[in-house]
Image (cartoon, rainbow, N blue to C red):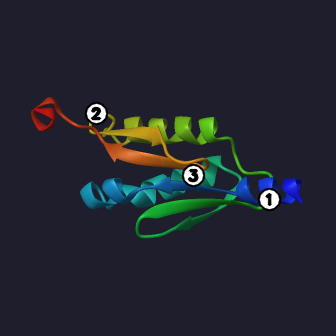
Amino acid sequence: MRKDKEVNELSSMVIDISELRSAYGDKVEDLEKLLKEKVKAKIEVGAREITLTAEKEGEIPQKDHVRVLLKKFLHKAEIRTEFRVIAGQENRLMIKERKTTEEAE
């Protein structure tokens, strides 16, 4: 029974894009295209997140691989200085807005 639970947990990954969408809503479509090209998974785009679901059980891409793809996307979209990719809970990545030195003070 334990293995079944682990497979279910590893069958999807969530990317929180709420901050990206609020600042650059048009870039979300570009991110979706990139993920469809590079990741072998079913991709569902919602208002606040993108969900990657394994087409076959247990074949969700590695979190590190998806993180690198997200970083490449930010660089290609020329918004790398404004956003960063951070790890959330177990199968969750987040695209967060960087705090500038003015905001930190």
Say which label, 1 or 2, has the lower sequence index: 1
In this rendering, is residue 91 above or below 104?
A: below
Q: Quadrant of residue 63?
A: top right
Which of the 4 quarters of the picture holds residue 102? top left
Mark sitting earlier along the chain (2/3): 3
Q: Identify the disc placed on residue 5.
A: 1
- Marks counted in the figure total 3
Q: Report the front residue among 87 and 70.
A: 87
Residue 25, by quadrant, is bottom left
Q: Residue at x 47, y 53 (%)?
A: 31
Q: Quadrant of the C terminus?
A: top left
The secondary element bearing badge 2 is classed as: loop
Mark 1 belongs to which amino acid?
Lys
Q: Secondary structure at mark 3?
A: helix
Give the x, y percent position of residue 60: 72, 51
Label 1 and label 2: CA atoms lie apart by 39 Å
The percent position of residue 98, horizontal first and vertical second, equals: 27, 38
Given contact means CB atoms under 8 Å apart, are the residues at marks 1 and 2 in contact?
no
- Residue at label 3? 35
Question: Residue 30 or 42: which is nearer the viewer?
Answer: 42
Amino acid type of the residue that numbered disc 2 sits on in the rendered structure: Thr
In the rendered structure, the answer to whether residue 103 lies left or right of residue 27 reads left
Q: Nearer the viewer, mark 1 or mark 2?
A: 1
- Circle 3: residue type: Leu
Disc 2 target residue: 81
Tell me: 62 left or right of 5. left
In depth, the one of 89 and 46 nearer the eye is: 89
